[in-house]
Image (cartoon, rainbow, N blue to C red):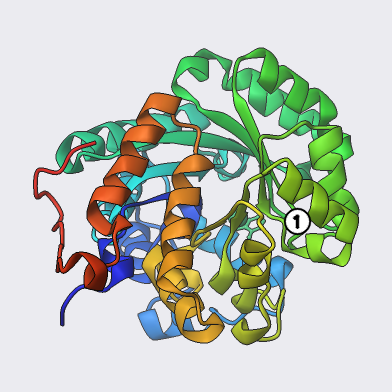
Amino acid sequence: MSPTLIDRLPKAELHIHVEGSIEPDMVLALAERNGLDFPHKSKAGLLATYEFANLAGFSAVYASNSCALRTERDFYDLTYSYMRRVREDNVIHAEIAFAPQGASHRNVAPEIALEGVLAAMDDAKAAFGMTGGVIIGCQRHRGAEAGLNMLRRMKPYRDRIMALGLASLEVGHPPRLFLRVFEEARDLGWKTVAHAGEEGPPEYIWEALDILKVDRIDHGVRCEEDPRLVRRLAEEQVPLTVCPLSNIYLKVFPALREHNIARLLRAGLLVTVNSDDPPYFGGYVNANYAACRDVLDLSDEEIIQLGRNSFIASFLPEEQKCNYLARIDRIVGAAPEASGMKDVAPIGSGDRA
Ligand code: HPA
Ligand code: ZN
């Protein structure tokens, strides 16, 4: 089958939880490698738990499977596998979230885990010609004090961390509670992002913007309930890292045809397409693009715009952003029928930004 526009489109992934990128086979293999008494022995048994009523239901399975991750090598293997897999989707830049608090609560030193993640990213960048960075996530259900302790513990890695994020159970844990954590992150020179408006109300998006002063909103899809907020997001071009399939699997929307990503894009918001936790939610980033194309009738121009948005919304330096945007233009910028080109740049074709 010839590659589609989505296959050929260079893209960045900006919303992916590294622990949530663990494939079921790897959960079982690592549980065995680490000699753990894991509740599921078979893949079928494990997969039977992949049915989620909401974010809380998912988080329980996610936390249980994350217990398989014990050593630096585990985190290395996990991260490297993700990078290798998404390079097939033409992801050339990845901003990956890692949750130090999850590791410490499983009695894994977060420094050790982070070393594994960083080493894998370095190796994958060298092997696949990619760029990327790590976003350390504050888990909101553990409270602000715990978040602050985590941030301070991670300070020795300040130069190797790109941003602070805010994730886990949203409702009942409004962004405003985490003001101190975000202030300290900004003082370290980090960018900041926060999950808001996934299950939580539009007010949480306002708080993330006005109190935490985040650079990007993760999800943000419930903004549509507040037209004034939609106008602001469009005017200020605040990036939203939308995860369409995640939103269906976690019942944020009843069906993909009711998802608002196309409407938000057409209203001029800086939306991007991402996978969140791909093995749990039916696919990696290209599966998310393809599902939106098929169900929401995205045009070729809109698909290209989404690819462009992924770099515009990234934390890359401006010059690198421009290089990547130029790469999109070279590869898919001119519609193939218009240019007469059947231009496909296969992975590793030597096309470097
Ligand atoms: N929302 C909040 N926290 C998360 C998610 C999500 O979709 N995935 C992994 N942690
Ligand atoms: Zn997420």
Three-letter residue code for mark 1: Leu
x and y, in percent, of residue 246 in the image:
58, 69
Which of these two is toward me, 26 or 32? 26
Residue 164 located left or right of residue 85:
right
Name the quadrant of the N terminus. Answer: bottom left
> Where is 102 relative to 20, above or below?
above
Which of these two is toward me, 259 or 247? 259
Residue 38 visible in this rendered orientation of the protein? no
Name the residue: 20% across, 64% down. Answer: 339
> Where is 75 relative to 346, above or below?
above
- Which residue has dot 1 on it? 169
Label 1's element? loop
Which of these two is toward me, 195 or 339? 339
> Where is 96 relative to 243, above or below?
above
Q: How many marks?
A: 1
Q: Quadrant of residue 119?
A: top left
x and y, in percent, of residue 195 in the image:
70, 50
Ligand 2 rendered quadrant:
bottom right
Residue 189 visible in this rendered orientation of the protein? yes
Name the quadrant of the C terminus. Answer: top left
Name the residue: 80% across, 56% down. Answer: 230
Note whether ligand 1 is within 8 Å of mark 1.
yes
